[in-house]
Image: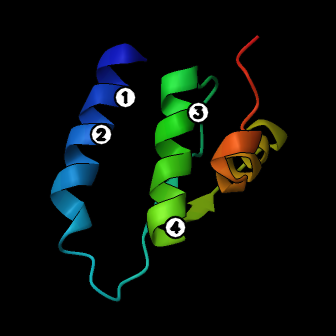
Amino acid sequence: MGPWVAELDRLWRLLESTLQSRKLVIDLCGVLHLNSAARRLLGEIHEKTGADFLADSPMTRCFADEARLPSKQVLKEE
């Protein structure tokens, strides 16, 4: 998770300035776990862009729903 979150953050920062009016879609299909850093990053991306999430299971739908929450409401990692 750690190196993948850092890589997503790096790519997101590169992509952010090129989005303009295009809609960002993040594919969460097949994701089994998110650590707190990944949750915060997805929330930040959603907050800045209104990104949509593709989700294929109850778990990934939960991740997507959590990313859509205002940053103060993001659930703590257990």
Residue ID for mark 2: 9
Report the number of numbered marks: 4
Badge 1 is on which residue?
5
Question: In this view, which residue lies farthest toward the front?
Answer: 72
As drawn, the label of residue 51 is: 4
Label 3 – label 2 distance at C-alpha? 17 Å
**Residue most extreme to the bottom:** 21
- Residue 3: x and y in percent read 29, 18
Amino acid on which the number 4 mark rests in the picture: Ala
Q: Position of residue 77 (x, y in %)?
A: 70, 17
Residues at marks 3 and 1 touching, judged by CB atoms closer than 8 Å: no
Mark nearest the camera among 3 and 1 is 1
Query: Which residue position is annotated with label 3?
Result: 31
Between discs 3 and 2, the one toward the N terminus: 2
Query: Looking at the figure, which quarter contains the C terminus?
Result: top right
Cα distance in 3D space between marks 4 and 2:
15 Å
CA neighbours of label 1 inside 10 A, class few (<14), some (14 to 19), many (20+)? some
Distance CA(mark 2)–CA(mark 1) = 6 Å
For this orientation, the residue located farthest to the right is 58
Asked if residue 57 lies left or right of residue 44, the reply is: right
Give the position of the N terminus as an image quadrant.
Answer: top left
